[in-house]
Amino acid sequence: MSSSAAASLDRLSLPDAAGHFGIYGGVFVPETLMTALQELTAAYDVARQDPVFLQELRHHLKEFAGRPTELYFAERLTHHCGGAKIYLKREDLLHTGAHKINNALAQALLARRMGKKRIIAETGAGQHGVATAAACAKFGLECVVYMGAHDMERQALNVFRMRLMGAEVCRVEAGQKTLKEAINEAMRDWVTNVRSTHYILGTAYGSHPYPTMVRDFHRVIGQEAREQILAREGRLPDELIACVGGGSNAIGLFFDFLEEPAIRMTGVEAGGHGLGRGEHAARFAGGRLGVLQGCKTFMLQDAEGQIELTHSVSAGLDYAAVGPEHAFYRDRGRIEFAHASDDEVLETFQLCSRLEGIIPALESTHALVHAIKRAKALPKDKIIIVNLSGRGDKDVEQVARLLGEKHS
């Protein structure tokens, strides 16, 4: 990408006033929610420029969540690959186990500022649900989390953690019983209880202002990584890699490097069992433009526009659509996208655990799969930063079962 093309991205001017990233984004919701979204947009526009709000958020991110997170040199993994240096941005070390706490704390503070005492959220892998439950417990807010029945089974530990912190976890039995259906139920709740309730959406998706707001609350990842790699290596990295479901951890890492044309950025989607219909969640490998759950973006759908079934070993990437900002930068060639299969993820999950003593979340492991491929292909003087967006404690039981089935 040329330096002139990078400069023309003008990342800080996006989205426009209507929430569009080029042709992507926007607001596609029932009329009942328009007032709530307008209220949220106005409240966020004030809060993001309010030193008191920002100082309080920084305080809670440090004292409660545990920021800054370490930038860790994965020495043994690097030696195994024999090429580029691999650094891990350790979002897995945050309280509740993933990057999700950045956004949950910020939106809970914003809800309190708006006088909303009831919080609803959706969750797939459970990490956003756990983070929301923790933030609500901290600030004394009522918390209701919607979760697909299938995800509740494969993420039983996180279900218990949410309930332990006082959240009501609502089992969603509709459809595929995963993240898409959980979002549907959360939106139905919000329509019904819009006056008293704030919806803490967990990823950089949905109607404006959510993609922008969630991105901004996760920018701290990339801001820290920039400072840390300059301190460690005296220069910026050559590549950034992150997993992409909706895309919050990835845009959080990428955003503050977008206007650095020499840095390659790759988002890694869920390749599942392969790229057959219903076997994966790689939107850029098999999707097209459409509208889903308040947002125009790239998604998996059939010729009639019906949303296709998805699959991933990781509940957090098992979703038919991708955040609009990712689609925008992909069209412009600024962010590339790859995918990792379930088998590759299970192999790398074990490899990272064995070589580094770090058990990564299955979602984050997708990024590690691609990072290992890239490190092997690059010379030793190159630097890769991988966003280790979450820890794999939640996945150990599921992986043990899957490996047992595979080897039986």
Image (cartoon, rainbow, N blue to C red):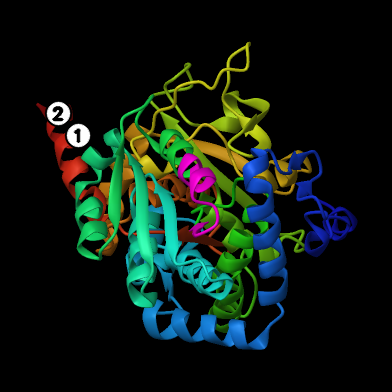
Could you tell whether 262 is left or right of 106 in the image?
Answer: right
Amino acid of disc 2:
Glu
- SS type, badge 1: helix
Residue named by callout 1: 402
Residue named by callout 2: 405
Residue 27 is a magenta residue: no
Amino acid of disc 1:
Leu
Residue 316 percent coordinates (x, y): 40, 44
Image-quadrant location for residue 74? bottom left
Q: Is residue 103 above or below residue 264?
A: below
Q: CA distance from mark 1 to mark 2?
A: 5 Å
Identified at 14% across, 28% down, the residue is 405
Q: Is residue 124 above or below residue 99?
A: above
Residue reaching furthest to the left: 408
**Region in magenta:** 187-199
Disc number for residue 75: none
Identified at 81% across, 43% down, the residue is 22
Could you tell whether 46 is left or right of 246 in the image?
Answer: right
Identified at 32% across, 66% down, the residue is 96
Residue 241 percent coordinates (x, y): 54, 53
Could you tell whether 298 is left or right of 340 in the image?
Answer: right
Classed neighbour count for the residue bearing mark 2: other residues with Cα under 10 Å, few (<14), some (14–19), many (≥20): few
Could you tell whether 359 is left or right of 267 in the image?
Answer: left
Q: Is residue 354 above or below residue 288?
A: below
Mark 2 and mark 1 in contact (Cβ < 8 Å)? yes
- SS type, badge 2: helix
Residue 42 percent coordinates (x, y): 72, 66
